Image: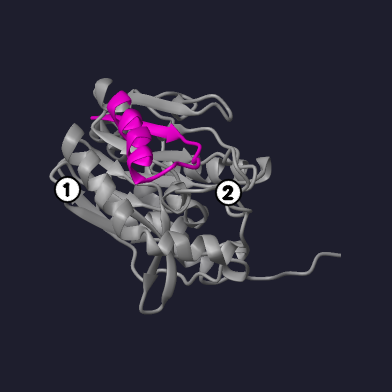
Amino acid sequence: MKIATSLYRPGWHADLAALEGKLDGWVAEAAGQGAELLLFPEYGGIEIAMLGARADNPPATVWRDRMAAGEGAWLDLHRRLARRHHVHILAGSLCAATADGVVNRAWLVAPDGSAVAQDKLILTPYEREDMGLVAGRDLRVFDTALGAIGVLICYDCEFPLLARAQVEAGAQVILVPSATDLAAGLTRVRQSCRARAIEGQCLVVQSPVLGSDEPCEILGTGTGRAGIFCPPDHGLPPDGIIAQGALDLPGWVVAEVDPAAIAAPRRSGQVGNFAHWGEQDSRVNLVTRQRLG
């Protein structure tokens, strides 16, 4: 399977046709390199709210509501792109309205236009306090023609039990669309992706978002580096990095991967993180505290 993950910068467009033209060019470029699965980043979907005349940078809640209003058009656009180029696409996440409130949602679209969604489960303080979002309810694994795929949106990947639940449910690949404003956030998410690959002995793919050329409260300065990660073990890169892009340079990172080969260390690796996970349980459920001195 060939995967393309993006470092992507959203921008303003005159109308939906102009936005589709930009994304069509991106998808065509990756598909032209043989990519079968394409990843766009967290809040890449803000572009559906960046159409028409440019306006002063509104507060986060206005961006939230604009994205939610455009969710249907955003999904339809990616259905067209997936069909046109015969690829799977993880569309850039955006805000979506539900009965519980507004969530941060990423749609995974198949070449036939069918689509499934994963909502962000653990929200950052900014998403809770400034954006007024609510957390998603369900953690999912999607059975696709390319294998079993899980999605963890940015901050979710910093919580190992979420990824563990997905790999126990059969996920071979975990996709991580991300948005980080500062270098510290970039480090947290990137290192978490690499840790999840080690713990789950699986493939983890990150797609970050860059800040917009126009002021955007939600994107801020936006920094990142796209990467494709695996467990460092027999037959795999010793640093656990299959491919990575340059810092803050927009574009695709494309690599041929074999999820079965990446999971092979579960059976014959130098270590057995996946198999030995349960050995933590008896220790963490009983912690003794002792005084010294």
Which is more toward the observer, 227 or 160? 227
Q: For this view, does 264 lie left or right of residue 221?
A: left
Q: Position of residue 26 (x, y in %)?
A: 35, 30
Q: Quadrant of residue 140?
A: bottom left
Residue on which the image places disc 2: 219
* Residue 266 on image: x %, y %: 31, 40
Q: Residue furthest right?
A: 293
Q: Quadrant of residue 97?
A: bottom left
The image shows residue 8 at horizontal and vertical percentages of 47, 36
Front residue of this view, candidates 173 and 79: 79
| Quadrant including the N terminus | top left
Residue numbers of the magenta segment: 1-29
- Determine if the magenta segment contains residue 124: no
Mark 2 nearby-residue class (10 Å; few <14, some 14–19, many ≥20): many
- Secondary structure of the residue carrying tag 1 is loop
For the point 46% across and 24% down, which residue is it? Answer: 238
- Where does label 1 land, which residue? 113
Placement of 67 over or under 40, stated as above or below? below
